[in-house]
Image (spheres, rainbow, N blue to C red):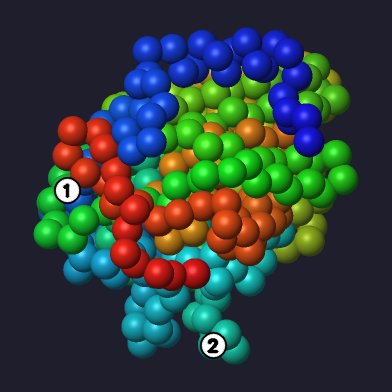
Amino acid sequence: MTSLMPTPSRQLTARLFTGLQPSTENRLAYRIETHQRTPRRAVHCQGVGLHSGQSVHMTIKPAPAGSGIRFIRTDLGGQSVVAHMDKVISTTLATTLGEGASPCTVSTTEHVLAALRGCGIDNADIELDGPEVPIMDGSAAPFCALLRAAGSRRQNEPRIALRITKPIYYEDGEKRISVLPFAGFAVCEEIIFDDDIIQRQFCSTVLRGDHFLTDIAPARTFGRVEDVEYLWEQGLALGGTLDNVVTIHWNRKSVLNEGGLRFANEFVRHKVLDLIGDLSLMGFPLLGCVHAFKVGHTQHFGLMKKIAASPDSWELVQLLPGGFFRRADTQVM
């Protein structure tokens, strides 16, 4: 199968990997924390759900090593759902998690999950008193600020990662996404829209250092003004305002938000943010390079299912000091 990315994107991708360690059998492209981490203390925020419009209080708390990320509905007596791909019940407009026939569901999970991944948090309990994560300003930046204020604590359990060893491809019509072997985590994404303000945009990033915090986290969710109005009529996007959605003008050449865009390519950067958040549902940090073309939550989920169904194309590895890894003994998925 040929590469998903056109020639200009390949050139940008080549620049992305400049200065990284050459690939060897057990060496990472750059150093990654070897042990699991959890927030040092609890932090709290309040906002509204983008689609429900309901006010929601959310608290992110420390959690034991190996417990992963868990959403806890305090309004349902503490019922909870683990942030894992097996719990995905909907990918329409956002990623929604649920626990079987239980009323315990949590929607719009991708932004806070991206923040946790970008800030290097493996284990946390997220308490909510409603069915949706607050949208805040439409990006992951407020959640990152919370997590940085909380600090993080190194735990005794080693960090296990899912390392891609052979290319894995998923296609849904013209929408295509793949993950290729790479001893780190990188995303190269391209979108194409008819809107003059978007047209064709490309973004590539490696999840190391502060790259996520500065380049991806501030990018906000977006939509056309008439699409937002239509969703309002359908009882959706009830919490959407110019304070939390980049709203494209009817003329398709500008946005209605008074401050304009945070980046010239903010639209595709937000797509990368969503992708990072969704892929955290694999249950392990991913070691691989993801190439995405015109995809959304549904295709992210499709790739995750394809990865899970391709055990000959990945392995679990333990991250070691000095930027190395070794095959882990753990057998999961």
Q: Position of residue 9 (x, y in %)?
A: 67, 17
Say above or below: 322 vs 315: above
| Marks 1 and 2, how far apart at CA | 32 Å
Tell me if mark 2 has few (under 14), some (14-19) or many (20+) residues whose alpha carbon lies within 10 angstroms of its own. Answer: few
Number of disc labels: 2
The answer to whether marks 1 and 2 mark residues whose Cβ atoms lie closer than 8 Å is: no
Disc 1 is placed on an element classified as: strand
In the rendered image of this protein, does residue 85 appear above or below residue 218? below
Which of the two residues, 206 or 160, is positioned nearer the viewer here? 160
Image coordinates for residue 115, horizontal then vertical, percent:
38, 44
> Can the viewer see residue 239?
no
Q: Amino acid at mark 1?
A: Ser
Three-letter amino acid code of the residue under disc 2: Ser
Q: Is residue 87 above or below residue 37?
A: below
Of 89 and 3, the residue lying toward us: 3
Image quarter hosting the N terminus? top right
State left or right for residue 156 relative to residue 279: left
Residue for badge 2:
102
Left or right relative to 282: residue 326: left
Secondary structure of residue under mark 2: loop
For mark 1, does the 10 Å Cα neighbourhood hold few (<14), some (14 to 19), or many (20 or more) residues? Answer: some
Residue 296 % position (x, y) = 69, 46
Please state if 37 lies on the left or on the right of 76 as rendered: left
Judging depth in this view, the residue of 66 and 142 nearest the camera is 66
User: Which numbered disc, 1 or 2, marks the residue that appears first in the sequence?
Assistant: 2
Residue at x 48%, y 26% (from the top left corner): 205
**x and y, in percent, of residue 261 in the image:** 56, 20
Residue 333 in view, yes or no: yes
Q: Is residue 98 left or right of residue 78?
A: right
Q: Which mark is residue 297?
A: none
> Which residue is pictured at 51% across the width and 11% down the height?
15
Residue pointed to by mark 1: 152
